[in-house]
Amino acid sequence: MGIVKISDVLHDDLRIASLSMSRSINAQAEHWIRIGMLAELNPDLTYSQLVKKMMKDNALTLKEIIG
């Protein structure tokens, strides 16, 4: 685990978004990072499609762990 330095403005945005989405600030930052990475790798997908892809990928991983 490392420390990532971000601007105060982005940190404030994270705090507001995390409250709205009922996530911790770190969980919100991880969500934005994952969505951003997926968006760069899949520029043709919409936000909703990216979220579905993320959920599908996580579900497959969970099935592998449980199964």
Image: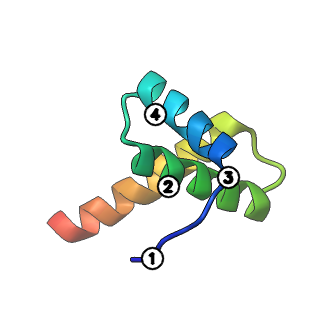
Mark 3 is on which residue type?
Ser
Discs 1, 4 touching: Cβ within 8 Å: no
Mark 1 is on which residue type?
Gly
Of circles 1 and 3, the one toward us is 3
Picture quarter with the N terminus: bottom left
Categorize mark 4 by other alpha carbons within 10 Å: few (<14), some (14-19), many (20+).
some
Considering every residue shown, the one lying at the far left of the view is 66
Q: Position of residue 54 (x, y in %)?
A: 51, 52
Considering every residue shown, the one lying at the far front of the view is 8
- Residue at mark 2 to residue at mark 4: CA–CA distance: 11 Å
- Residue at mark 4 to residue at mark 3: CA–CA distance: 16 Å
Q: Is residue 56 above or below residue 4?
A: above
Q: Is residue 2 above or below residue 19?
A: below
Mark 4 is on which residue type?
Ser
Of circles 1 and 2, the one toward us is 1
Residue assigned mark 1: 2
Who comes first in sequence, dot 4 or dot 3? 3
Who comes first in sequence, dot 2 or dot 3? 3
Residue assigned mark 2: 30
Q: Secondary structure at mark 1?
A: loop
Mark 2 is on which residue type?
Glu
From the viewer's perspective, is 8 left or right of 63? right
Q: Secondary structure at mark 2?
A: helix
Task: Tell which of 17 and 66 is nearer to you.
Answer: 17
Task: Tell which of 14 and 57 is nearer to you.
Answer: 14
Q: Position of residue 7 (x, y in %)?
A: 67, 52
